[in-house]
Amino acid sequence: MKQYSPGKLRNPLRRKPGTERGAGEFEEISWDEALDILTKRLEHIRATDPDKLAYFTGRDQMQALTGLWAQQFGTLNWSAHGGFCSVNMATAGLYMLGHAFWEFGDPDWDRTKYFMLWVSLRITPPIR
């Protein structure tokens, strides 16, 4: 279904010039053009304020490599799926209950008086 879906993106898309964000009006561009645009934007961000880049990867299991890339770029704003999902839940379970409870069991809700989940993000203005 993913492979043959008529809605599958086959080329990079760029918002049509003169349209507002959220209007849903895009045009296909070549991969070379998309990479040129990205390269110019990243060069500008790195030269002016690297922390304007927020770099997030999904469940790719390459967090060490992507973290190294972000650090070399100069941004503190990077993370990956595990930092927001199961890693935190498992750690909280280990500290509170002595075992990770995400997929491996449940918290002891009967004896739980307080449950706190702390997420700290540094938000920067959107890149334009």
Image (spheres, grey):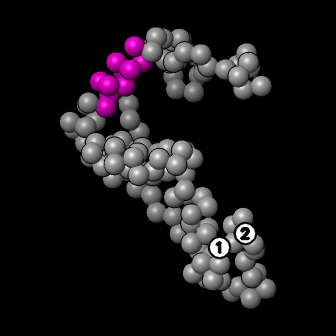
Picture quarter with the N terminus: top right
Quadrant of the image occupied by residue 45? top left
Q: Is residue 73 left or right of residue 81?
A: left
- Categorize mark 1 by other alpha carbons within 10 Å: few (<14), some (14-19), many (20+): many
Q: Which mark is residue 104?
A: 2
Q: Is residue 124 visible?
A: no
Cβ–Cβ below 8 Å for labels 1 and 2?
yes
Q: Is residue 36 magenta?
A: yes
Give above or below for 94 relative to 7.
Answer: below
Q: Nearer the viewer, residue 108 or 101?
A: 101
Residue at 30%, 49% in the rendered image: 71
Q: Which residues are magenta?
A: 32-42
Q: Residue 106's x, y, as percent? A: 75, 74
Using the image, determine if residue 88 lies above or below residue 61.
Answer: below
Residue under label 1: 100
Identify the amino acid type marked 2. Answer: Phe
Q: At which x and y percent is residue 6?
A: 73, 15
Residue 34 part of the magenta segment: yes
Q: Determine whether the residue tagged by mark 2 lies in a helix, strand or loop.
A: loop
Residue closest to the eye, 78 or 48:
78
Magenta stretch: helix, strand or loop mostly: helix
* Residue appearing at x 38%, y 50% in the figure: 67
Q: Residue at x 53, y 11 (%)?
A: 28
Position in image of residue 84 (x %, y %): 55, 57
Is residue 111 shown left or right of residue 115? right
The quadrant where residue 96 appears:
bottom right
Amino acid type indicated by mark 1: Ala
**Quadrant assignment, res 97:** bottom right
Front residue of this view, candidates 107 and 40: 107
Q: Position of residue 54 (x, y in %)?
A: 40, 44
Q: Is residue 35 visible?
A: yes
